[in-house]
């Protein structure tokens, strides 16, 4: 989910006082219905689904997900991008030439590379929950051939971590980039919305969508009109000058990517809100996945944590808490902080050129070489 800037959209700022009032009222559902209707409103014309920039094939197609295969050589450990199942397209991982995480990873040496491309929910998917998506992620891993190097992006990060805990023998190394794990470690714009809003508001959004959370409508929470050129330039970390032909092309691609949204199953959406954001079950050790309680202390695979210093959606401590929650040896945990904002981790030119090639080198190592805990480092963005 992308928020154009640290500024709150008018819709969101307007709704916050109503959420507070609702949480203190016996008629919370009535407030929720009233304000959810104001915020959601009618759907606009459908946008075109963003295209992936790098040539590839579809290795497997399930009801919930496509497995995109970017393999160039059938050797080495396979890597799977667990993209976000959130508001925007998984093409965030392969946005455009010069701004493609997929292309960066391949160029840096990952020859067997795959991506989970979560599909927009249809009416018959409205009852799917977290377990259903974890089960299908397991099918993808089996299709590729375990063990895999699992690279979790944003909301795909906590899912990747849960998967590594649930199926420890199927993950060789784990990368988490901009992933919310310990929601209570520090506030972010996204976690504050979840915290301040009564569950009835989210339930009403699901009811209004007949069991589906329609992305095109929820996007109004974040203010489509507030996506301005300066924001795009900052997120993409591009050298292209505003007004140039090169920037105009990037701007058109970005607006197209931003406008196309993913519909979410209502059951999945409510589970994420309640279990992850309200109860913080993953960090607290109460999260249950596919019939087993997830104990992060039992995760022992090497882990690389990547954060954006000015991330407006995931506070750095929400990600870096992983270091104290998992059982991975200190010498097998790396972390790095890059300059920029959330989406810049996956699209930003300086992040792609600076941090991700290091991650590929780390992935290609047979094991962590350092006997001591890695210290946080910084990669400054290109001015």
Image (cartoon, rainbow, N blue to C red):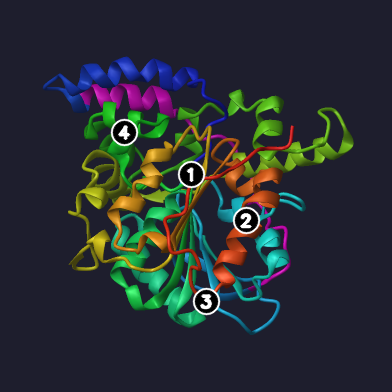
Q: Nearer the viewer, residue 17 or 288?
A: 288
Image depth: mark 4 or mark 1 in front: 4
Q: Nearer the viewer, mark 4 or mark 2?
A: 2
Seen at 24% across and 68% down, the residue is 290
Q: Which mark is residue 356?
A: 2
Give the residue pinned by disc 1: 87
Q: Which residue is mark 4?
A: 194
**Residues packed near mark 3 inside 10 Å, few (<14), some (14 to 19) or many (20 plus):** few
**Which is in the foreground here, disc 1 or disc 2?**
2
Image quarter in which the C terminus is found: top right
Q: Visible in this render: residue 44?
A: yes
- Marks 3 and 4 sit apart, C-alpha to C-alpha, by 40 Å
Q: Residues within 10 Å of mark 2 (few under 14, many from 20)?
A: some
Q: CA distance from mark 1 to mark 3?
A: 36 Å
In this picture, residue 195 sits left or right of residue 147: left
The x, y position of residue 318, in whole percent, is 37, 42
Task: Give the side of residue 145 with respect to residue 92, left or right.
Answer: left
Mark positioned earlier in the residue sequence (3 or 4): 4
Q: Is residue 101 above or below residue 18?
A: below
Q: Secondary structure at mark 1?
A: loop
The answer for how far apart the CA atoms under marks 4 and 2 are is 31 Å
Q: Are marks 4 and 2 in contact (CB under 8 Å)?
A: no
For the record, the magenta segment spans: 30-57
* Structural distance between the alpha carbons of marks 1 and 2: 24 Å
Of mark 4 and mark 1, the one earlier in the sequence is 1
Element assignment for label 3: loop
Q: Pointer 3: what residue? A: 366
- Dot 4 lies on which element? helix
In the displayed structure, does residue 359 sit left or right of residue 215? right
């Amino acid at each position: 989910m992308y928020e154009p800037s640290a500024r709150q959209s008018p819709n969101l700022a307007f709704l916050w006082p109503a959420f507070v009032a609702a949480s203190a009222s016996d008629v919370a559902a009535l407030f929720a219905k009233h304000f959810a209707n104001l915020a959601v409103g009618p759907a606009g014309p459908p946008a075109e689904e963003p295209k992936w920039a790098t040539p590839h094939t579809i290795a497997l197609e399930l009801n919930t997900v496509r497995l995109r295969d970017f393999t160039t050589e059938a050797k080495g450990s396979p890597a799977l991008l667990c993209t976000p199942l959130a508001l925007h397209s998984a093409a965030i991982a392969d946005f455009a030439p010069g701004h493609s995480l997929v292309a960066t990873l391949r160029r840096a040496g990952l020859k067997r590379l795959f991506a989970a491309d979560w599909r927009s929910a249809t009416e018959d998917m409205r009852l799917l929950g977290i377990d259903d998506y974890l089960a299908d992620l397991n099918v993808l891993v089996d299709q590729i051939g375990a063990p895999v190097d699992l690279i979790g992006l944003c909301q795909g990060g906590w899912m990747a971590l849960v998967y590594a805990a649930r199926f420890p023998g199927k993950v060789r190394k784990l990368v988490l980039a901009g992933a919310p794990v310990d929601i209570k470690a520090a506030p972010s714009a996204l976690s504050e919305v979840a915290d301040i809003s009564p569950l009835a508001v989210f339930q009403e959004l699901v009811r209004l969508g007949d069991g589906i959370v329609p992305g095109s409508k929820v996007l109004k929470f974040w203010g489509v009109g507030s996506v301005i050129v300066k924001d795009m330039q900052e997120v993409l970390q591009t050298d292209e000058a505003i007004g140039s032909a090169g920037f105009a092309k990037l701007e058109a691609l970005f607006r197209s990517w931003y406008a196309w949204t993913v519909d979410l199953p209502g059951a999945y959406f409510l589970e994420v809100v309640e279990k992850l954001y309200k109860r913080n079950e993953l960090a607290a050790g109460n999260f249950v996945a596919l019939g087993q309680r997830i104990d992060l202390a039992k995760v022992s695979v090497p882990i690389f944590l990547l954060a954006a210093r000015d991330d407006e959606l995931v506070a750095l401590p929400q990600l870096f808490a992983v270091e104290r929650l998992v059982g991975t040896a200190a010498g097998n945990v790396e972390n790095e902080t890059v300059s920029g904002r959330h989406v810049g981790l996956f699209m930003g030119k300086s992040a792609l050129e600076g941090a991700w090639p290091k991650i590929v080198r780390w992935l290609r190592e047979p094991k962590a070489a350092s006997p001591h805990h890695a210290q946080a480092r910084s990669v400054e963005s290109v001015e």
